[in-house]
């Protein structure tokens, strides 16, 4: 357990030492989204019948920030360790693959939650935030951050160069995030895009998280939770398997 705790602290300190870049900058970006989209669409769009657009937008921005930063934490740490060569110290340690996975993903959850709380604190000045089900908010917050932390670990192990990791972010993470309903309800989409959204796991993370605020969602929250947990389990098994085999780590 000492090794696991040491890895966890090392990963937390790694992003905390550059907190302006890893925590403050995403909060400022989310505020810019809120100011631009809120200014343009507030008063013109009502969601779920009675909810004003800015109130609807805030949970989406919080979850988007959580997911992107949880992914960035594990993926950047792994690729940096591979390129600089200090990964060998981790591989020579007595840590098991499962302990390595838990250490990396737990730190990613901490960073994701820290950024999410920062966005919440920054946006509370602009909108009266009501939380209908705090338990569902926390559950989707942690599960979503863990899922993207696991995905970031898989991407970091797979990538051999920074441009490969950038391709993963630009062609998978960003499109999936922006097509997940952060800025809109999928009920407003044409049937083709609405049906396509149901194959996007990011949609279920954001829709389930939003249910915790309003008690309403585009799909049943139980279905969202099931999709998130199944995806988390699948990526966790894949990441631990890659660590155990030393895929692109030992050869």
Image: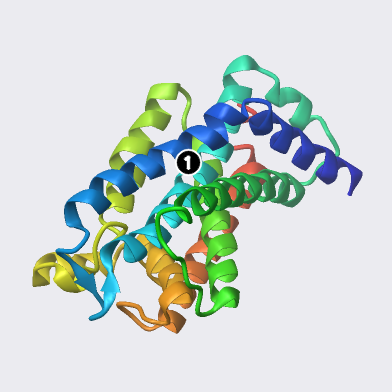
Q: Residue at x 63, y 24 (%)?
A: 81
Residue 106 appears in the picture as rendered: yes
> Where does residue 86 sit, x and y in percent of width and height?
70, 20
> Where does residue 55 sit, x and y in percent of width and height?
36, 65
Work out which quarter of the rendered image holds the C terminus and state it: top right
Which scheme is used to colour this image of the protein? Answer: rainbow
Q: Nearer the viewer, residue 214 or 171?
A: 214
Is 104 placed left or right of 30 in the picture?
right
Is 18 placed left or right of 227 in the picture?
right
> Where does residue 197 sit, x and y in percent of width and height?
24, 65
Tell me the crowding category of disc 1: few under 14, some 14 to 19, or many 20 or more residues within 10 angstroms, Cα based: many
Is 117 placed left or right of 185 in the picture?
right
Q: Nearer the viewer, residue 70 or 242?
A: 70
The image quarter in which residue 164 lies: top left
Q: Residue at x 76, y 33 (%)?
A: 10
Depicted 223 relative to depicted 190: above or below: below
The image quarter in which residue 88 lies: top right
Q: Residue at x 53, y 35 (%)?
A: 24
Q: Mark 1 points at which residue?
A: 27
Depicted 42 relative to depicted 149: above or below: below
> Where does residue 80 sit, x and y in percent of width and height?
58, 23
Q: Which residue is drawn at 76% across and 49% down?
A: 99
């Amino acid at each position: 357990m000492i090794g696991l705790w040491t890895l966890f602290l090392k990963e937390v300190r790694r992003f905390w030492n550059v907190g302006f870049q890893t925590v403050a900058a995403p909060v400022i970006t989310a505020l810019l989204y809120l100011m631009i989209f809120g200014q343009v669409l507030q008063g013109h769009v009502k969601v779920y019948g009675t909810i004003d657009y800015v109130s609807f937008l805030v949970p989406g921005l919080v979850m988007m920030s959580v997911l992107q930063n949880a992914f960035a934490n594990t993926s950047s740490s792994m690729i940096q360790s591979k390129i600089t060569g200090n990964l060998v110290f981790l591989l020579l340690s007595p840590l098991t693959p499962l302990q390595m996975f838990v250490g990396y993903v737990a730190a990613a959850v901490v960073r994701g939650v820290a950024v999410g709380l920062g966005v919440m604190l920054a946006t509370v000045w602009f909108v009266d935030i009501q939380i209908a089900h705090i338990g569902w908010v926390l559950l989707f917050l942690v599960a979503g951050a863990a899922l993207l932390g696991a995905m970031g670990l898989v991407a970091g192990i797979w990538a051999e160069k920074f441009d490969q990791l950038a391709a993963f972010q630009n062609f998978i993470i960003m499109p999936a995030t922006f097509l997940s309903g952060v800025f809109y309800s999928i009920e407003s989409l044409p049937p083709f895009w609405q049906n396509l959204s149901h194959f996007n796991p990011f949609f279920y993370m954001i829709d389930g998280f939003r249910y915790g605020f309003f008690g309403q969602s585009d799909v049943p929250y139980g279905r969202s939770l099931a999709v998130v947990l199944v995806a988390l389990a699948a990526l966790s098994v894949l990441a631990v398997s890659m660590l155990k085999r030393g895929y692109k780590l030992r050869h």
